[in-house]
């Protein structure tokens, strides 16, 4: 057993399974047999059999599950349905792919090369499908909750990524931004105070966030929240 390719039993089995499972190269059973026979006749060592490959695939599926479900329609047509949420979960749990995942839509300024650059992802997603929070310095800030940045109170309604000028004005860097309503603490009547929410929305860098809603609740002197 080669631990570096676990749960595949060997590097040869892993590479062969990777080849035959390629989404861009669809091998028939006859082609798989021909490739393995050719490799064996050329003197290649440790060439797996089709039976060994199927056993390895069954073992992998037993370890991590199989996101593809086979469905036979009433017309006898056969379909394979992939579980999207299961695939995304595996991508996030994979240490090699999790850093390539994009949590937020990106403002491509009219350019589009990936799905997260699309205007629908940026402007037209229903509120329940938006990423609900952002994590900054181990603090989690949620949309539609009051927070405090370095300059103002703010209610974020939408998190996204965009290129903004860095300290060096000649360079742009991709940052997580928040679209939302600036808010201002004010006295309503002598015995009551509250927040005036500006209906116009602005964009702030999430790196400027300093206090979460929980922090503001516990700071009575700052916001004068009362517990009921």
Image: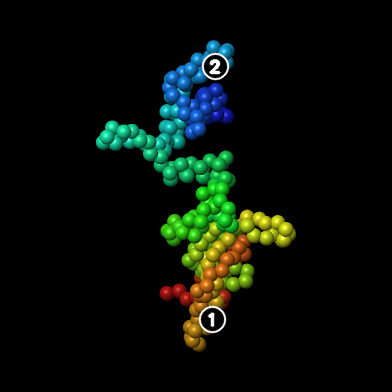
Q: Secondary structure at mark 2?
A: helix
Q: Position of residue 186 (x, y in %)?
A: 54, 81
CB atoms at circles 2 and 1 under 8 Å apart? no
Q: Foreground residue, 161 or 133? A: 161
Q: Foreground residue, 29 or 134? A: 29
Q: Position of residue 138 (x, y in %)?
A: 58, 57
Q: Foreground residue, 112 or 83? A: 112
Q: Position of residue 153 (x, y in %)?
A: 56, 72
Q: Which residue is mark 1?
A: 186
Q: Is residue 18 above or below residue 52?
A: below
Q: Badge 1 local density, few (<14 within 10 Å), some, or many (20+)?
A: few
The residue sitting at the bottom extreme is 190
Q: Foreground residue, 147 or 123? A: 123
Q: Which mark is residue 39?
A: 2
Residue drawn at x 48%, y 41% is 90
Closer to the chain start, of discs 2 and 1, is: 2
Residue drawn at x 43%, y 45% is 85
Q: Secondary structure at mark 1?
A: strand
Residue drawn at x 47%, y 21% is 32
Q: Nearer the viewer, mark 2 or mark 1?
A: 2
> If the image is split into quadrants, where does the C terminus sit?
bottom left
Q: Badge 2 local density, few (<14 within 10 Å), some, or many (20+)?
A: some
Q: Position of residue 11 (x, y in %)?
A: 56, 25
Occupied quadrant, residue 152: bottom right
Gap between marks 2 and 1 measured at Cα: 78 Å
Occupied quadrant, residue 100: top right
Can the viewer see residue 186?
A: yes
């Amino acid at each position: 057993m080669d631990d570096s390719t676990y749960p595949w039993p060997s590097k040869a089995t892993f590479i062969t399974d990777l080849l035959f499972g390629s989404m861009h190269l669809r091998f028939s059973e006859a082609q798989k047999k021909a490739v393995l026979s050719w490799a064996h006749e050329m003197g290649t060592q440790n060439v797996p059999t089709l039976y060994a490959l199927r056993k390895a695939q069954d073992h992998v599926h037993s370890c991590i599950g199989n996101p593809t479900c086979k469905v036979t329609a009433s017309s006898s047509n056969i379909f394979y349905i992939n579980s999207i949420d299961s695939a995304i979960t595996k991508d996030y749990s994979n240490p090699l792919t999790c850093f390539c995942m994009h949590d937020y839509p990106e403002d491509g300024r009219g350019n589009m090369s990936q799905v997260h650059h699309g205007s629908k992802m940026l402007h037209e997603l229903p509120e329940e499908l938006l990423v609900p929070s952002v994590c900054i310095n181990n603090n989690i800030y949620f949309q539609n909750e009051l927070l405090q940045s370095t300059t103002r109170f703010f209610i974020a309604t939408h998190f996204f990524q965009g290129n903004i000028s860095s300290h060096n004005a000649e360079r742009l860097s991709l940052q997580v931004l928040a679209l939302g309503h600036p808010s201002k603490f004010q006295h309503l009547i002598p015995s009551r105070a509250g927040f005036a929410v500006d209906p116009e929305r602005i964009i702030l860098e999430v790196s400027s966030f300093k206090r979460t809603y929980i922090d503001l609740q516990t700071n009575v002197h700052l916001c004068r929240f009362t517990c009921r």
